Image: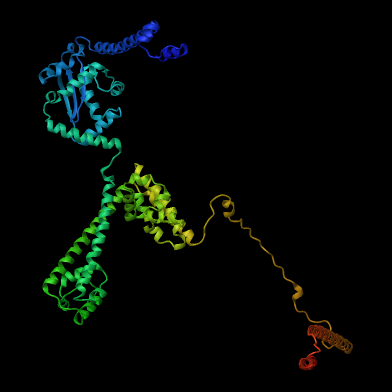
Amino acid sequence: RREHSGRDRQLGGPVSVGSDVTSQHPWRERRFRTFCVLCTVERLGIVGRELAAGRAALKPGLTMLVLFETSVGYAIFKVLNEKKLQEVDSLWKEFETPEKANKIVKLKHFEKFQDTAEALAAFTALMEGKINKQLKKVLKKIVKEAHEPLAVADAKLGGVIKEKLNLSCIHSPVVNELMRGIRSQMDGLIPGVEPREMAAMCLGLAHSLSRYRLKFSADKVDTMIVQAISLLDDLDKELNNYIMRCREWYGWHFPELGKIISDNLTYCKCLQKVGDRKNYASATLSELLPEEVEAEVKAAAEISMGTEVSEEDICNILHLCTQVIEISEYRTQLYEYLQNRMMAIAPNVTVMVGELVGARLIAHAGSLLNLAKHAASTVQILGAEKALFRALKSRRDTPKYGLIYHASLVGQTSPKHKGKISRMLAAKTVLAIRYDAFGEDSSSAMGVENRAKLEARLRTLEDRGIRKISGTGKALAKAEKYEHKSEVKTYDPSADSTLPTCSKKRKLEQVDKEDEIIEKKAKKAKVKIKVEEEEEVLVVEEQETSVKKKKKKDKKKHIKEEPLSEEEPCTSTAISSPEKKKKKKKKRDSED
């Protein structure tokens, strides 16, 4: 059709195959119909050859055995009437009732499975195209002795049987129809097996096979972890509320007890054992408290400033204490269950970050598989989403850690290195999560190894021995080669004290020369001092003369600026008098 439509487009004719093509190009329609007929004949020929092969295997006078697998065991049937197998289309009519089916086939041997585990092993071997030991024994015992062809439902299984046991196997459409008929009347053809037992075994085997194919384990159900950690958090909140209520309630009667006993569970057990404050004097609390604390409690009970309460109030307080003790015991039991579950499902994550942090990470992601899909940077800030978006909105620094902050490795780090350690811990934790989620091995060796590396890295950070790793830092990080330089020191003999060759008494000429040299040096020093003093005096005189010149210039300017009016002689005289006084003062200052 594609070829014809392409030609029609080139010729400008119609594209559809129908009456238009028949009317315009009838030879194309005939050609297309001939092609369809040839394809049908070829297909029918293949089916015919298969049927012929099946009929050829069923030689007259030679019986055939049928291997039929059930969820209860292996069944081997013997074909009684081979003529009925020649008619494939009408073979289903021979299996309409159990009576008709028993005329076609008859049970020769039935090998029953002992339990579901054996059935699972047998069917997994069949699915992989292998022969189970049990099936091999049956075939050697029943089929090989009979020297009859064996009809099988799987061609791959037939090839393996023929290769290993040298048995002729048949697989054809006739065999498929025969298997379908046996399956429809299985309850009547296999005696000794109840329908209920057959259905139960079939259901159990189906679940086991699906788990095997999906690599599913009932111990690795992370839903239990999600529920357990949520319940643990709820119990902690309820316990806190109950204990605070109990302390406040009993504090009206005996307020000093809450300050002496800080442990909540011990506090409730003391209340449950003693009750009223008056009973502490005669009660023995050695099982709950040390001797010093017990003596302090008894002394405080005698001089307590609490109010008196009725017996009904004490009873209600004791009921509350009983609830607190029971919830605390259940909380410890739930924590142990969570520890065991985490070690079964995610052992490497448990080693890296602990049971509680690992369980909270799984619960926050929804499942272990969802957590394995996250990147290391996401796992690092998992649980701090509000702070992250708040920081992005306000354009501030994003948080460095979320739930992983509560891990022991981050907690024991100094505040300076918490961000770095949390980043490295998140990277190693993601590897552990993926190994636990997708790995077949359930050991915690990988987690132990990675934790040791992180602890070593933490020690180097704390010791400030950070090594450069990236880029050219490798060359810088290499320590220089140590070369020992041995310096040989020699002894200087000139430093030895030797006896003088000349006498200790100096001559008079030497003494006179030394005195003259000393006098010359003293004279030179005096001359230098005088010259320096004269230079200082000259500098001071020059400074004084420059100051006087400046003052004279200022006076001249001041006199020019003041106009002398002839009409007012009195004022001029009045003005001139203070000028004279100023001149006298300036002369005195200069002389001083």
**In front of the other: 214 or 580:** 580
Which residue is at a point 12% across and 33% down the rendered structure image? 196
Is residue 318 shown left or right of residue 538?
A: left
Give the quadrant of the N terminus.
top left
Q: Identify the residue at the far front of this view.
A: 567
Q: Eyeballing the image, is 231 above or below 414? A: above
Tell me the colour scheme of the image: rainbow
Place residue 83 in its image quadrant: top left
Is residue 152 shown left or right of residue 581?
A: left
Give the quadrant of the C terminus.
bottom right
Which residue is at a point 23% across and 27% down the rendered structure image? 135
Place residue 478 in its image quadrant: bottom right
Count of numbered circles on the image: 0
Task: List x then y, in percent, for residue 374.
Answer: 39, 46
Which residue is at a point 23% across and 77% down the rendered structure image? 256
Q: Identify the residue at the far right of this view.
A: 509
**In front of the other: 529 or 76:** 529
**In front of the other: 438 or 255:** 255
Place residue 301 in its image quadrant: bottom left
Asked if residue 454 can be seen in this view, the reply is no
**In front of the other: 450 or 566:** 566
Task: List x then y, in percent, for residue 545.
Answer: 83, 85
Task: List x then y, in percent, for residue 416.
Answer: 47, 62
